[in-house]
Amino acid sequence: LIEKRRRRTGKSVKDDEFVGAVPEITEMRKPSDYAHFRTSMCDDVQESETLKLRPYQEELAEAALRGKNTIACAPTGSGKTEVAIHVATSHLDERAENRQPARVAMLVPRTPLVDQQKHRFHKYVRGKYYVEGFHGSGLKGASRRDIVLACDIVVMTPQILLNMLKSIRQDERLYVCDFSLLIFDEVHHCTKDHPYNILMQTIHDYQGPKPQHTLLCRGLPARPQNVIIMMKVVTWEIQLFSAVPSYNQISHSMGRLIEWSEYCGVE
């Protein structure tokens, strides 16, 4: 694999620069240890706005605020992003109070959403938490990895995260344990080969500590075959923290999907 990488990149890379040359990392690398890689604090001069949730948004966030893996289902325009921001900031606040390291990644399926969601986070957390965004045309190599590790909250496409989780270079590599909370946006778009599906499998197979998960979706996909895939993703999500998921977890999440599938005429 290393030789193939050398031939593909055309670069001369020393053996000790590859992941195999060092032990596997199983503890989060703290954002505070990488704070000197933060590129800009210009937004900190502005005061952040106070985030106020509506009652139905508070209900969507309730389980996630208890540290549970959660699927937040609500129609377009109902404020799921605000729910995600509230969950993320509450998670960071609680971990800070308990003197535990924390890092949140919000994953979005399309490049234009990276900057959009990054700015939504800035609106409410500027001056308190450091936020960055990454997509395919962003920074490369060591700069990207170190800036991700410097973040309290990072918004990125799932393919970028997958690439960094699988990189064989030490200076590009991220680990699942580098994150304490993952937020998956628009999971209703998930298909068989979608990076969300591959990423969930990668996390499921990871042997170290796994982050909490919050999935955001507006309902079932339109195509029946994608409904099945969506159900599998939900099942992965439920099982990530518990070898034997509770009946309530399964019936609540799958029950919603079954109701929607009947409504859409999907068998």
Image: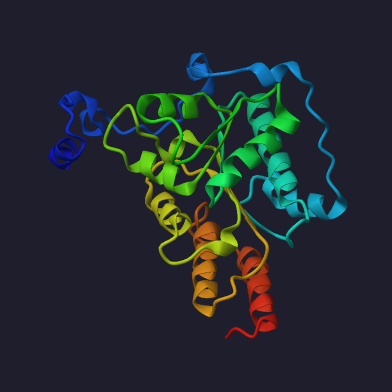
Q: Position of residue 71 (x, y in %)?
A: 64, 58
Q: Which residue is nearer to you in this view: 185 or 241?
A: 185
Quadrant containing the N terminus is: top left
Q: Position of residue 84 (x, y in %)?
A: 68, 45
Q: Which residue is nearer to you in this view: 185 or 27?
A: 185
In the picture provided, is 107 more to the left or to the right than 24? right
In the picture provided, is 29 more to the left or to the right than 48? left
Quadrant containing the C terminus is: bottom right
Q: Which residue is nearer to you in this view: 62 or 15?
A: 15
Residue 32 in view in this figure? yes
In the picture provided, is 225 more to the left or to the right than 90? left
In the picture provided, is 231 more to the left or to the right than 95? left
Q: Position of residue 153 (x, y in %)?
A: 59, 33
Task: Tell me what residue is drawn at x 68 percent, y 32 percent.
Answer: 94
Task: Classify residue 254 by image quadrant.
Answer: bottom right
Task: Tell me what residue is drawn at x 60 percent, y 67 percent.
Answer: 250
Q: Which residue is nearer to you in this view: 9 or 60?
A: 9
Task: Tell me what residue is drawn at x 54 percent, y 79 percent.
Answer: 224
Residue 182 in view in this figure? no
Q: Position of residue 85 (x, y in %)?
A: 70, 40
